[in-house]
Image (cartoon, helix red, strand yellow):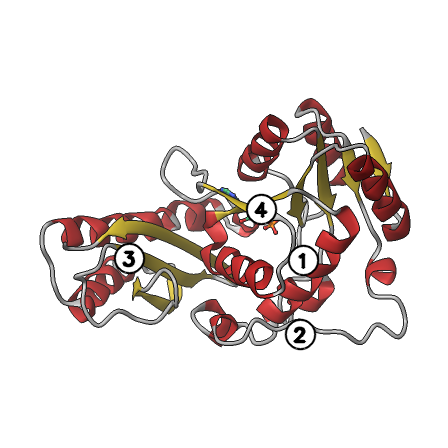
Amino acid sequence: METIRLPIIMQGTALREKSRAKSIGFVPTMGALHDGHMALVRAARAENDIVVASVFVNPIQFSAGEDLERYPRRLSEDIEKLEAADTDILFLPEASNIYPSGFSTSVCVKGLSEKLCGAFRPGHFEGVATVVLKLLNIVQPARVYFGLKDYQQSLIIRRLVKDMLLPVEVVLCLTLREPDGLAISSRNGYLSAEERKAATVIYRALLMGAEAVKDGLKSPSELGALMREALATEPLINEIQYIGAYDPETLDALETLVKKELLLATAVKIGQTRLIDNLLCNGLK
Ligand code: AMP
């Protein structure tokens, strides 16, 4: 695996490979790689001539008081994992090369960016959209891989690609979970043993919601209340930012469950750790 640090070198390499009709599959990450990330790398490996993964903890998607400084950094383990998965190129830029002095551009996917997580993390998705557009311009992939674990992010990126007619296919991959159901996340490492156990309630609450929908529950507010109660059984959940049933295209709270597909989604805090999860399920026909 080759490691490239400079954007201009990465872009030159990518353009050269493209001119040789090689397809590039790209997996953008913030590192501390886990099985969820590696599933994206495997999908990229299966579908492209060249696999590029980036590790970049994007400072502009963190606001003051968030976990930018303590975000886990495990570069040597990341390199081992990427090599084992037959990655061709690790793109490992410095923040000063992605945002050199004078950098002034910001990309905002309006509407979607303000909902759900956006209401609690102002500026977050603008930071995500800005870095993703820049990374796509640098890496020039035919396909870019994102996880449904970050459903709202994946929707915003799909919107960005469509709106700006970016010549890339966005491939979405299912959420990988621990055996007890907790969605795998780099932030799970912040949890104490007790908190880690408590965190299993998040997926249970979503499953309970999906089950209630399957059993014919018609009221979104009742559904929300049911899932909220499920979360509230766990005293270590100290904040429920949102939980409910949402339109998977607009992220608006649903007024009826008579929909083909609905998104059950939540964000909670356990101690200082913010965790998100979601589940797509079929509503009543
Ligand atoms: P991150 O390093 O958190 O920015 O994540 C990089 C990519 O991995 C994003 O597209 C995430 O949605 C995806 N990802 C993170 N956790 C998981 C998971 N448990 N299953 C599948 N994809 C994931």
Q: Nearer the viewer, mark 3 or mark 4?
A: 4
Mark 2–mark 4 Cα distance, whole angstroms, equals 33 Å
Earlier sequence position, callout 2 versus callout 3: 2
| Other residues around mark 3 within 10 Å, as few (<14) / some (14–19) / many (≥20) | many
State which quarter of the image contains the N terminus.
Answer: top right
Q: In screen coordinates, is 147 left or right of 71?
A: left
Q: Which residue is mark 4?
A: 169
| Other residues around mark 4 within 10 Å, as few (<14) / some (14–19) / many (≥20) | some
Earlier sequence position, callout 4 versus callout 1: 1
SS at circle 3: strand
Q: Nearer the viewer, mark 1 or mark 2?
A: 1
**Considering depth in this image, is 218 or 178 the residue closer to the camera?**
218
User: Mark 1 belongs to which amino acid?
Assistant: Val
Q: Which residue is mark 3?
A: 262
SS at circle 4: strand
Q: Which residue is mark 1?
A: 132
Q: Which residue is mark 2?
A: 64
Q: Position of residue 250 (x, y in %)?
A: 39, 68
User: Mark 2 belongs to which amino acid?
Assistant: Ala
